[in-house]
Amino acid sequence: MAIATGAAIEFFGTQDTLGTSSAAVSNAAFSIASDLSTFTNDDDALTASVTLLSSFAVAPDANSAVNLFYRLLNVEGIYDNSIPDANFQHTFAGNFPLNDATGAQYATIDISLKNGYTSQQYEFYIQNESGQTISAGWDLYVTPKAVGPHA
């Protein structure tokens, strides 16, 4: 089936790899800021596709997930939103479903991006709800998206 001219389709920006030296994340714990690089939304996109690469030495619990949170940086001058934690989960972006298997897993979700200004900066965090420890070296890939007319 051909997509009609003028039909709404998605356009994708350049994917950013945010992992630098991510540490292991215990079950029920949050990652720390130094695990990932800051994401700058240079395209001022309203949505993004986010892929989590995680691996497990012991299989995650069946039907478990890893939750994704973010905070906006420089929302008022040099001031940032609060860092997400067990008592502040108001910046929930989505969750990555996990397979109950060992080894590397890739899970992709679409999220909404809140922009307070052009080229908004974000700091992403994960919360491990897998029942097991996520091995060090996990990564997050962010691809900004937009919708426009098909040529």
Image (cartoon, helix red, strand yellow):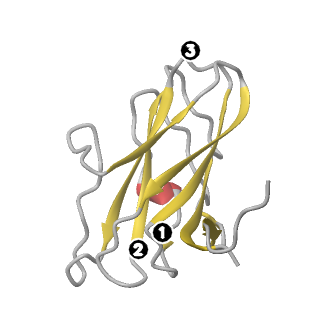
Residue visible at 50% across and 29% down? 65
Identified by mark 3, the residue type is: Ala
Q: Is residue 74 left or right of residue 87?
A: right
Mark 1 against mark 2, which lies toward the viewer? 2
Q: CA distance from mark 1 to mark 2?
A: 7 Å
Callout 2: helix, strand or loop? strand
The image quadrant that residue 116 belongs to is bottom left
Residue visible at 65% across and 46% down? 137
Name the quarter where the C terminus is drawn.
Answer: bottom right
Identified by mark 2, the residue type is: Gln
Q: Which residue is mark 3?
A: 62
Give the x, y percent position of residue 69: 38, 49
Identified by mark 1, the residue type is: Thr
Q: CA distance from mark 3 to mark 2?
A: 34 Å
Callout 3: helix, strand or loop? loop
Which of the labelled discs sits on residue 105, or is there none? Answer: none
Residue visible at 43% across and 50% down? 125
Residue visible at 30% across and 51% down? 91
In the rendered view, tell whether residue 28 sits above or below residue 101.
below
Give the x, y percent position of residue 92: 34, 46
Give the x, y percent position of residue 57: 68, 24
For marks 1 and 2 on the same chain, the one whose residue lies earlier in the sequence: 1
Q: Is residue 60 left or right of residue 88?
A: right
Callout 1: helix, strand or loop? loop
Q: CA distance from mark 1 to mark 3?
A: 31 Å
The image quadrant that residue 5 belongs to is bottom right
Q: Is residue 35 left or right of residue 83?
A: right
The image quadrant that residue 94 belongs to is top left
Task: Tell which of 6 and 29 is nearer to you.
Answer: 6
